[in-house]
Amino acid sequence: MHSCFAPLPLPRRNFLGRALLGAGASILSPSFGRADDSAGIVDRDLAAAMGKAELSLQFRGHTADECRAWQDRFQTKLGELMGDSTPPAKWTIVEENRVEFDEYSRLELLLNAEGVPSLPVYLLVPKGLSVGQQTPAVLCVHGHGPFGNDAIVGRREQEGAAEHIAKLNYDYGVQFAKRGYVVAAPCMIPFGRRVDSAAYRGNDPCAVTFVRMQALGQLPITANVRDLRWSIDLLQSRPEVNDDAIGCAGLSYGGRMTMMVSAIDKRVRVAAVSGALNLMQERMTLRHSCGSQIVPGLLKYGDYSEIGSLIAPRPCVWETGSKDSLIVPKWDEVFRGRLRRVYEAMGAGSNLHFDRFEGGHEWSGRIAFPLFDEVLKS
């Protein structure tokens, strides 16, 4: 699977890691380059700055009241950093294609609204629903890779798609549909049919898109959260969907965006974040991270762990494969520790789940599927 998490090509690097749960101390003491090099090497200087990131709004309380007050403060600050992610109020739907399978129908939709780019969305609708029957729904989010949201709904026509899906257990949209859920699988930017990869001539579309949108005062991560929230609107507009029973699941960048939209939009009642238990502080220090995941200024106030903590007290499972090279030991425990503190302060420790399965950077579902059934079908 293509990832924007590529190791930095720096010679003789070594990192001394200390897993600290609080702010105000450097987790990493990076050392790059020659011992006698007094010049300001930008990679070294930035790595040192990352290790000293302020994280001034980290939760340090103990009670549920303190935690709710902290969530309000951090949610407000996150909104200031990201900007508005509200989906369009009025929109139309074009049905581009429909394919019938034994257990579900697959609709190819295009959502159109004035002032925003059109949004391609797959909708999977289980068969066998009686007239007037409503069923839960899941927003399924794709990650990096050449196939975008096609992989989520099991499309194997393109060369290499079948192997890609098999390796990552990537068709979890189909798996949810077969369990009786209506599934929305939108295509995010810059992926799938929403990007012309060849035009970038080997450059990372995530990085280029980030720079271009910044010039317009926009962010890819905010645009994608808007489109995910728009997809929730689509689900709630469907007559066969119980609009109070919606979950969200995603792998890799899809896991990151599952975390983001679940933190921001309380309509998500349960979430499964797979292959994304890593921190911006770690990613930007140890390796390159993609522009589609960047919230400018975040490390002044918190990290991905604080965003993930906004999901509390709602149920959430965080999946990590034992052989996933993108999950860095010690740093993952920093993340888990911060999540635990928030959930426990809110008296919701039983709603926080960690699926540590045998495998690589892939979808598990071992805990997620029964958890979604328990929360959304009861």
Image (cartoon, rainbow, N blue to C red):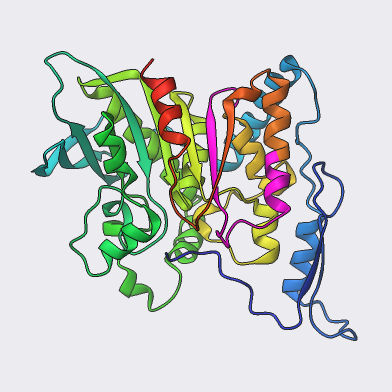
Task: Give the side of residue 89 with respect to residue 265, left or right.
Answer: left
Q: Is residue 89 visible?
A: no
Q: Is residue 327 magenta?
A: yes
Task: Give the side of residue 37 with respect to residue 311, left or right.
Answer: right
Q: Which residues are magenta?
A: 312-336
Q: State the image coordinates of residue 280 (x, y, percent, origin top left).
A: 65, 53
Name above or below for residue 9 compared with residue 299.
below
Q: Is residue 165 visible?
A: yes
Task: Give the side of residue 318 with respect to residue 233, left or right.
Answer: right
State which quarter of the image contains the C terminus.
Answer: top left
Q: Nearer the viewer, residue 101 or 305?
A: 101
User: How many labels were placed on the picture?
Assistant: 0
Name above or below for residue 151 compared with residue 38.
above
Q: Is residue 11 magenta?
A: no
- At 13% from the left and 17% from the top, the residue drawn is 130
Q: State the image coordinates of residue 319 (x, y, percent, origin top left).
A: 53, 44
